Every structure is written in structure tokens, then in C-alpha cells.
Amino acid sequence: MDPRVDSEGDSDSEPQQLLSTGIGVETMEDIPAPKAVLAHFMVGNTYSYTDSEWINDIELAHSHGIDGFILNVGRDPWQPLQIASAFKAVSLFRFRLCLSFDMTSLVSQSQSDITTLKEYIEAFGNHPNYFRYHGKPFVTTFGGEYATFGLDSPTSGWKSVLSQLPHTIHFVPTFFVMNHVDRSVLDGDCNWDGAWPMGDSPISFDSDRQRVVANQGKTYMATVSPCFFTHYGPDSWNKNFIYRGDDWLYNSRWEMLVQHRSQIDIVEIISWNDYGESHYIGPIRKDQPNSQAWVNGFDHQAWLEMTSYYASAFKTGHYPRIQKDQLYIWARPHAAAASAHDAVPKPKNTNWTRDILWAAVFTTAPAEVTLVSGSRTWSTAVGTGVFKVGLGSLPGHQTAFLSRGTSRVVSIPSNAFSFTLSPQTYNYNYYVARGSGHENELLSLEAK
């Protein structure tokens, strides 16, 4: 069988050009409503953060087209101090922060539990760098559709919360089940699970379409994520599964959101630093939730580099001109069907993913891209623009390069990462690497 795959998974097709540089897609609509791109940020993974680390993260995100962080707030008693540090750091930038109350962590059983939410809004809601939407502090949640705060229903509970806050907020929660809270209480909706396929199929806009209709013109926040893998055993969080990350998930989802941008107000990137679920695009820091076994050595900042292109397209309605050749590759470290002597069982849903070396090519002029997976090599011509190609994985080193004539204009080192059929432990995270222009960058070998 021909090892090539295109964006539809057809092994006999040529790689498909999806976008052209500097040319808007006809289905995109320019509308005057403001657009924003925010990244989900786990405050729970910042216990030892210094002011300089906050500054570095904010500066890094801002330089890649991200407008702000959505700070996931949990119950740890040290988190308010770190959030204060974040707001101190953000004062140096044209960057925004806002709060997401993690209702899987925060208590919501009585009226007194509202105090925590009130104190956060009182402390930070008026900060000059707080993200405001329609003139009000933007607040979201992770879950909370069952939170009653001691009253007879979640609707009554959230009405009570909103009435007691010191400021009127723009409330766009992430409720996973929508019929538990009356929509009149809400200013919009965030579709968290829209970021991944919920089964063995490519990503689609179907769940977004349903929620946009139900949202009745209120603020809609869509989500995008590069992957999902978590590997906690029964003696821990007992959370051990993958979502399908195939078919160039990060690129494909972004393209979908750009195409439907007239129906979307805000994009939330999942995530900046959620190491436990493997979908981080920021640098790997030391405060991990016991996820080192599948995170260390798997830097994802190449995906962050890619974000600039799509964030600009979403916000402006036009794909930006590609200024330099860039080549991105990513793959898992072992076969999906592999067995390992791991104390934690094999994750669920591993039959949803294929063994592919995925690649995205951003070109300033026609070129030839070559993918190498173990003993298998494949090349194809590409034009000017963005191309998505792939190669079936074989054991050994995984690499790629871009050529024009006899010159290699972009190369990814052959020791970037490898693929095996016999892993010692299960790891369905992705190695990610990037080559750019005349300077090669490898962002997948060591965690920073």
C-alpha cells in the first residue's frame, strides 16, 4: 500500500493544498464583531512560578497572536497569590487575563461558597488588563451545570451568584450538559468538547453548529486543541484515555473555525499548560500534576509557532502572507496497537488513532517535501501555501526536509525523535518538531 495520506486519509491521493498565502477563503465573512483568541491556562500548575515566569509566558503567548489567558481557578489556597502575580506581570503588556472557575474543584454546595467567586471578581475584575467583553468582565467556568449553591436548582444557584458579585459580568460558562441551567442566566456558551472528535472520526463542526443555534445569537466561544492523552491509574485520578488526534487535528480544527468565523466570537485554545492531558502548547514547566512520565521530552512549542498564522486568520478574516518556509512534523513514540509492561493499563480509545508521521508545510514558493519514517522515504511536490501531508510510521528515526532544486531549504534533524513497536510504557503524547527558513529549530528533545 502506498504510505502517503492526505487530509482525507486517502492513501492513494496527492497531498491536498488547503490554503493559499495572502488569499482569503470565499466562505469566510468579514464582520465587524470583535474576535479574540485566548488560551486556557491551568493556575494549578504554577505553584512555584516566579514573576519572571509569568512575564515569560505572557510575552511568549502575546508574540504568537494570543490575546489573553483564561485562568483556570481551583481550590488550592495558594492560587490567589499566583493569580495576583499574573495580574502584576500582565500590566507590562497589551495582553488580557480573565477567570475560569473550575467547578470540578471549587465547592458549590451552599450560599457561603459564593464568597470565593465574589472575592476573585472583587480583587481582579476591575484590573486594566482584565479581558472585557461588551464592556463587562468576561468570566467562564469549567463545568458547573450541576452547581446549586444550596438552592433548589442550578438555575437558581447561578442567578444567586450573579446577583451577589461586585460587578456585572459577561458570563460564558463551559457547561457540558446545557439543559440544567436556563439560558436566560447566561450571556453565551463555550463548547469545550468541540475541540476533539468524540469518536473514531475526523473533527467536524457539527457540535458547534448545534450549540450556535441553541445559543440564539449570544456570545459563542469555540475551542481548538492539538491532541488529548492522559494516563492516570486507578490509584490516582483514574483517568486513562485518548481522544483522536489524527488528520492534522490542530490545523484542521483551526481551518474550520476560520471558515465559520462569522458564527464564532472567541476561540479558546486548549491549552497553554495542561500537562496532564498532553495538549499544552506552551513551554514545559516543573509544576506538573504527576504527568512527567508522558510529558518530559515532548515539547509542543512548534504548535505554538503554528498558532500565529491561524490566530491572525481568525481575527482578521484573511490568512497572512507566509514570510518564510516552515516545516512541522509530529508523531507518537510508539505504535497504537503496541503492548507495554506498564503499571497503568493501556489507555482507552487507542484503536481510534493511526500510526502516521504527520506534517504541515508552509511554503513561500513551490518546493519538494520529503518525509522519512524509519526505512520509508516519500517525497512530493508542493506549491505556494499551506500543505498537509503524512507518511505511515515505521520503526526508527522520524524526520523531514524541504528542497528546491538541489538545495535543502529546511531540515529537521534526523535525531528529532523515533518510533518503536515495543515501548516500555504507554505514551500516546506527540513528539513535535519544526524547521524554519535557513535556521533549523528542534523543539521536541528536552523539556525546558
Image (cartoon, rainbow, N blue to C red):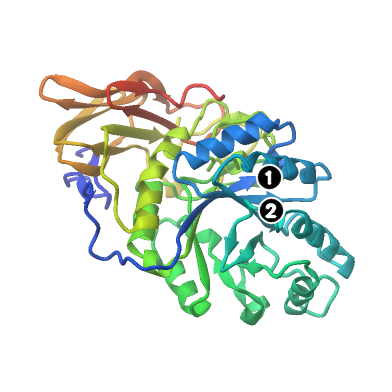
Circle 1: residue type: Phe
Location of mark 1 (residue): 87
| Residue 46, picture quadrant | top right
Can residue 336 be seen here? The reply is: no
| Residue 59, picture quadrant | top right
Q: Nearer the viewer, residue 40 or 138?
A: 138
Can residue 368 be seen here? The reply is: yes
75 relative to 157, above or below: above
Image coordinates for residue 336, horizontal then vertical, percent: 44, 39
Does label 2 or label 1 sit earlier along the sequence?
1
Q: Nearer the viewer, residue 196 or 219?
A: 219
Q: Nearer the viewer, mark 2 or mark 1?
A: 2
Image coordinates for residue 233, horizontal then vertical, percent: 68, 41
Q: Is residue 45 left or right of residue 395?
A: right
Mark 2, Cα crowd under 10 Å, few <14 / some 14-19 / many 20+, is: some
Q: Secondary structure at mark 1?
A: helix
User: Alpha-carbon distance for marks 2 and 1?
Assistant: 8 Å
39 relative to 373, above or below: below
Pick out the residue farthest to the left. 405
Location of mark 2 (residue): 127
Question: Residue shown at 43%/50% (left/top)?
Answer: 352
Question: Residue shown at 27%/53% (left/top)?
Answer: 8
Question: Residue shown at 41%/47% (left/top)?
Answer: 250
Labels 2 & 1 near each other (Cβ < 8 A): yes
Circle 2: residue type: His
Q: Nearer the viewer, residue 266 or 106?
A: 266
